[in-house]
Image: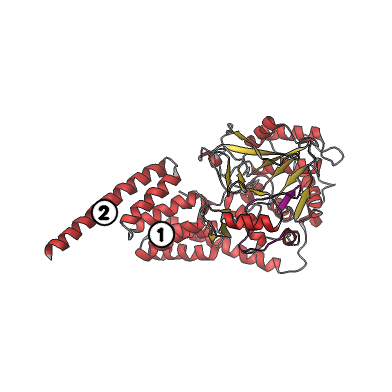
Amino acid sequence: MADVTNNDSVKMAEGERSAEELKEKANKYFKEKDYENAIKYYTEALELNPDNAIYYSNRSLAYLRTECYGYALADATRALEIDKNYVKGYYRRATSNMALGKFKAALKDYETVVRVRPNDKDAKMKYQECNKIVKQKAFERAIASDELKKSVVDSLDIENMMIEDDYTGPKMEDGKVTVKFMQDMMDWFKEQKKLHRKCAYQILVQVKEVLAKLPSLVEITLKDTEKITICGDTHGQFYDLLNIFQLNGLPSETNPYLFNGDFVDRGSFSVEVILTLFGFKLLYPNYFHLLRGNHETDNMNQMYGFEGEVKAKYTAQMFQLFSEVFQWLPLAQCINTKVLVMHGGLFSEDGVTLDDIRKIDRNRQPPDSGPMCDLLWSDPQPQSGRSISKRGVSCQFGPDVTERFLEQNKLQYIVRSHEVKSEGYEVTHSGKCITVFSAPNYCDQMGNKGAYIHLRGSDLKPEFHQFTAVPHPNVKPMAYANSLMQLGMM
């Protein structure tokens, strides 16, 4: 009997030792920013030693870095179930909840840390910062419930905004965007100079008017001889956006584009990206298309930098106007009745039709569930059926889900973005679900290529074009992000 017990103890000790070795291997990959391998080896360590809170906490951080907030939250929670005194676990869980916009839940965890460590300045700072957001959100809800919420446009007097004599940058001609203005503006931005606020407001007010007239599902027809370029996430990477135009030509009536959401956040030139895209929308309203991403929303902008950037470069009032404009971005686009493009993906339930998408009342912040949420947030998965989302929002859908949706709606395939892909694109679900991502070396650390797609009216066969990141001025990604997000990701 004693021998058996000894053997068990020896096996256990060996298991723990190998688990530690796997954890060290995972840590090494983590330091090299190879998060996929880090997750793989933390997972193997957990298989050998499933009661180690540190392994769960480490894997949670790797999930945070890869935007799998749902998985990160689950791991942090498991770490705390194993050891309720493990302070790092509370930090990890709070960051996961912050990333998901669940500020009250995050506040509870910061509160716990402050209680356990009353002299910890860092904990106190995080608690106060989070508390500020919770109060701000409550205040915003109170204002929003006032039915007569006015548009920022009503309080602007753009006509009488003075352009100072020492401003030598681009100006609109008779209040209109022209090809020359667009070229001048991009050159101006390239030199890290700021567009005059009068011009920025003119663009925003006019583009709001254009977008508000569009349906939630935009439908276009390409003739046999025509092609369109579809780009994925650009995430404030302005210099990479310029590179796309360099490689693929500037937008024009004969060179149409569709940008598939997530224009802002993370990259620290989001203002420049969005004003450029909105400018082209005004110049070529029928040949330059924009769809909403999950980052064209208040919660994401508050966490990932766009709100902070607009306030730093302009004003809080201008951010409010951006928020209003984002709410009018269409949610999906159908090309030649055969190809459906959306930012996220398909739906949590079967049976959704193109007509259901047309009927979505999109002028709002997206709900936590339902078709609008899914279009912005869902992801494909290789296995059949649906599963809980790694992001903690919407769902993951399998090839059978894609097949049924396409069949019901007489479509050939879908194009979506929303996920970093090492090659800049990925073809899954037997060619019926295509991902395109156009922010190369995402966040200056992922090392991925960017890509865009050419679609021709003659055969609608996707043609992929890859490109790599170009240098940009030394302003780090997330420079304007909420300080809690910055710290929580470290």
Magenta-tinted stretch: 332-353
Q: Which residue is mark 1?
A: 89
What residue is drawn where x is 31% and y is 57%?
A: 49
Tell me the amino acid under the disc marked 1: Gly
Above or below — where is 79 with respect to 235?
below
Q: Main secondary structure of the magenta part?
A: loop
What residue is drawn where x is 29% and y is 47%?
A: 21
Give the label on residue 408, or none.
Answer: none
What residue is drawn where x is 47% and y is 57%?
A: 71
Q: Magenta stretch: residue 38 in it?
A: no
Q: Which residue is mark 2?
A: 15
Helix, strand or loop for disc 2: helix
Above or below — where is 196 with respect to 86?
above
The residue nearer to you, when weighing 158 against 179, is: 179
The answer to which of marks 1 and 2 sits earlier in the sequence is: 2
The residue nearer to you, when weighing 169 against 463, is: 463
Q: Magenta stretch: residue 349 in it?
A: yes
| Distance between the alpha carbons at the discs numbered 1 and 2 | 24 Å
Tell me the amino acid under the disc marked 2: Gly
Callout 1 environment at 10 Å: few (<14), some (14 to 19), or many (20+)? many
- Report the quarter where the N terminus lies: bottom left
Q: Nearer the viewer, mark 1 or mark 2?
A: 2
List x then y, in percent, for residue 264: 64, 46
Above or below — where is 70 with respect to 304?
below
List x then y, in percent, for residue 141: 66, 66
